[in-house]
Image (spheres, rainbow, N blue to C red):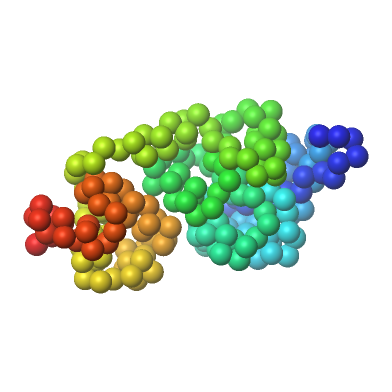
Amino acid sequence: MTADAAPISLLIVDDHPVVRDGLRGMFESVPGFVVLGEASNGVEAVARATALDPDVILMDLRMPGGGGVDAIAELTRRGARAKVLVLTTYDTDTDTLPAIEAGATGYLLKDAPRDELFTAVRAAAEGRTVLSPAVATRLVSAVRTPAGGPLSTREREVLALVAKGTSNREIARVLFISEATVKTHLTHLYAKLGVNDRAAAVAVGYERGILG
């Protein structure tokens, strides 16, 4: 970054004030970054991002009053310019895949070293994908999941609703999950059943006795 380049502007989204304060202090202590504002949940994050137009949003995922994945999906839908870098304590598949599929540019864990976080924000601002090693490993494993594995309980629930002709939006409402998560479950069950669409998934589901 050259000396006369504009600083990278940030929006910090986390439901814990101590975490927000810590991140703000960290980024304001080095040149090249400016923190435009903070938000404590996903709904507030969308509103603040729309008003402030930051370069990068540091987004927690699990927050009361509006989670990160739904906020990322909404920002993507609105065509927001900001790149979203997920910064969370969790690296489970149920968190990682929906966040990436919703439009997150990167995914880091909160125990990442300071320099790694600074580098990640700079990379995200340039539109490059940033993944912590643990998350990258999980994503590769998920993509390589061999066909024929047993469906999880949630995947069976999704498949049963698909068989009834239920839309992704309705499935999300019935199961109290986001549409991004529904799509993730569909991707997984398609891979396990060796199919490419809803109709084929339902046919194979009946064929294998998964659907009664």
Query: Front-most of 36 and 164?
Result: 164
Residue 138 located left or right of residue 104:
left
Q: Nearer the viewer, residue 109 or 184?
A: 184
- Asked if one can make out residue 152 in the rendered structure from this viewpoint, the answer is no
Q: How far across and how far down the image is residue 151, in percent?
A: 21, 48
Residue at 75 percent of width and 39 percent of height: 27
| Residue at 58% across, 46% down | 105
Q: Nearer the viewer, residue 174 or 40?
A: 174
Is 5 drawn above or below residue 73 in the view shown? above
Task: Give me the residue at 73% from left, 43% from top.
Answer: 24
Q: Position of residue 201 (x, y in %)?
A: 22, 57
Residue 199 pos. (x, y %): 23, 63
Location of the C terminus by quadrant is bottom left
Q: Is residue 48 left or right of residue 65?
A: right
The answer to whether residue 48 is above or below residue 96 is below
Residue 26 visible = yes
Residue lying at 58% horizontally and 37% vertically, measured from the top left: 130
Horizontal side of 97 relative to 54 (left or right) equals left
Count of picture labels: 0
- Looking at the rendered image, the quarter that the N terminus falls into is top right
Image coordinates of residue 7 in percent, x first then y, are 82, 44
Q: Residue furthest right?
A: 4
